[in-house]
Amino acid sequence: MGFWDRLFGRKAPEPQPAVPAPAANAVQTVNPREYLLKQVEALLRAEPKVEKVERHPDSYGLQFTRDGRQGSVFLDNLFADTREVPPEARSQLIQRFLRSLWQDGPDSLPWEEVRQRLLPVLRSATFGMSQLAQLESDRELVGRRTLPFLRELLVVDMPESAMFVQRRHLQEWGADAEAAFAAAHENLAGLPLDGVELYDREPSPIWSVDSGDTYETSRLLHPGFLASFTGRVEGRPIAILPERSTVLIAGDANPATVARLCESGEREYEAASRRLTPALYTVDEAGRVVPYLRPGNDALAQRVRLAHVRLALSEYAAQKESLDKLHEANSVDVFVASLSAVARKKDERPVTWCVWSRDVDTLLPRSDVVAMNPGNQDVFMVPWEDLERLMPGCLTPVPEAWPPRHRTTAWPAPDVLERLSTARVELEDYVGP
């Protein structure tokens, strides 16, 4: 099998073993997802004001009518939160979840009250994107781009649950996004800093943030919070936030400590039901949180880089899935390219790449290199920076796309393609910016 066959995943299908049919007297196990769905469905039907309940046609959830108003409830997060808890605690979580459905929403509150309840939260870039094809534009979540592959969203902290702010809420309140974010950060600054404790002293001090209010990761959005650990850790403060309520902070002076945070970030991210990012973060000169990249090309530096690449791969894959569904629903004929990655053999440095094929209207992910596929010639790799420099006008950024994408507006002319060919690189030789 050639290199490009391996790179593009072209291989002969392997024979699949036959699946034996279940015996006639076999005991059928209950699907836990189905069990939870039926449990919530029964509780909804028992609610006096609920007139109708039916399964959601496109998602794991239910649609219902209560007091003449239609609503939907999605159960993926509830399933993740309850599947490993004892029966009594499970029942309490489900009851609290259902009570949150009946509490007054943000649209029932005046701006003077709601501005005191606003808080910012960190979520993945694609959070909520899977529902875009089913939602009206005014129901999109209010957010802004804070860190690569992450978004800062707004919630209204209600008694039973935090409710996300949608565009329609701002219209009803007569407020704009800037004012809402300013109020949220003012409230964030007022949250107590309880729960910041020394997690471990070895290999060097590691601190945890466990406030118990589910806004642990939000505290990193407060200017100076992470920078305030200077002096309490060895070296530059670094943090992991693998899931929404987990924050560990240490310093980067001790390689063993950095490796331990990498391991914890990767493990917790993979295991979490509400995962956020496996990557490490630090602060810039102004005290703002930024991605942490360790200098050099040793194994630890590559491991730190790989965590950021894993986040990019996960978010671009989720974005592609959502965009494909959205385009199908709206009969849009455009190809959403995948982001892939390989490791250089000489040092295991991860390099991301995508494919641009001639005569294919494509949304390209931002990658280290692009495989140019003319169709009747050899495929060759070009660094993204050279692509933008040598062929202006052939790529157009998609403003609403996060993670970022560029739409291919024209295949390069023969002379431009020739210049691109002279800028070609082999993956093993790619150095990066």
Image (spheres, rainbow, N blue to C red):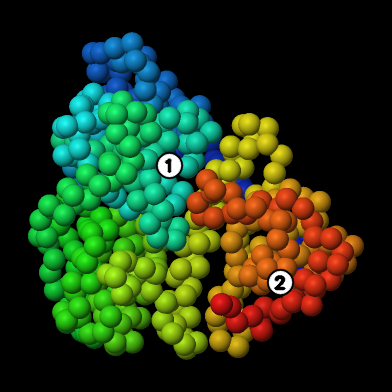
Q: Residue at x 64, y 35 (%)?
A: 328
Q: Nearer the viewer, mark 1 or mark 2?
A: 2
- Residue type at mark 2: give it: Val
Question: Which of the two discs, 1 and 2, labels the residue nearer the N terminus?
Answer: 1
* Visible residue check, residue 414: yes
Q: Which residue is mark 1?
A: 128
How far apart are the two marked residues, 1 and 2, measured between alpha carbons? 33 Å
Q: Quadrant of residue 260?
A: bottom left
**Residue 338 image point, x, y percent:** 63, 57
Q: Residue at x 36, y 34 (%)?
A: 166
In the image, is residue 301 above or below residue 103? Answer: below
On screen, residue 364 versus residue 78, left or right, reads right
**Residue 41 image point, x, y percent:** 34, 25
Q: Which residue is mark 2?
A: 382
Residues at discs 1 and 2 in contact (Cβ within 8 Å): no
Q: Which mark is residue 91?
A: none
Q: How many marks?
A: 2
In the image, is residue 345 above or below residue 379? Answer: below
* Visible residue check, residue 16: no
Secondary structure beneath label 2: strand
